[in-house]
Amino acid sequence: MKLLVTFSRGKGRKPIIAQVVRDTGVLINVERANIDSSEGEALIDVPDDQCQLVRDSMSGLGAKVHILEHGIIYNESECVDCGACISICPREVFSFDAEWKLQYADEKCILCGKCIDACPHRALTLPL
């Protein structure tokens, strides 16, 4: 399951993800992160059965944690199968099938948003 973790660095430079891995024993895959001197945001992937444990541990360390049920929202009725999203996506979330119909692999999405800007019909949106 994917979790979006946001935190303030005003309280110091605690290694939140490392501490949660150490304390819970749950391996965490960092899909993407954007951290500067005052705040940070990380999209992490954890086993579904350990999601609540990781969420509670991170919340206890002062982070805000949102469970993400989906990647980018794909509006199939707005899509014209142009493929603009295919070349821009760093995780190969989009592809064409044998009939040149766009296919979407939600589980690969890291919510970087590049496809949203590339889509000429605005068929893609962020879930938040």
Image: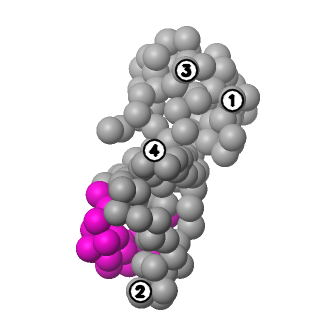
Binning the other alpha carbons within 10 Å of mark 2 as few (below 14), some (14 to 19) or many (20 upward) gives few
**x then y, percent, for residue 19:** 46, 79
The answer to which of 44 and 122 lies nearer the viewer is 44
Dots 3, 1 in contact, CB < 8 A = yes
Question: Helix or strand or loop: what does disc 4 sit on?
Answer: loop
Dots 4, 1 in contact, CB < 8 A = no
Q: Earlier in the sequence, mark 2 or mark 1?
A: 2
Mark 2, residue position: 24
Residue type marked 2: Thr
Mark 4, residue position: 71
Q: Residue at x 48, y 86 (%)?
A: 22
Mark 1, residue position: 88
Q: Residue at x 57, y 56 (%)?
A: 31
**Mark 4, mark 2: which one is toward the viewer?**
2
The answer to whether residue 2 is above or below residue 36 is below
The answer to whether residue 68 is above or below residue 56 is above
Q: Residue at x 43, y 48 (%)?
A: 38
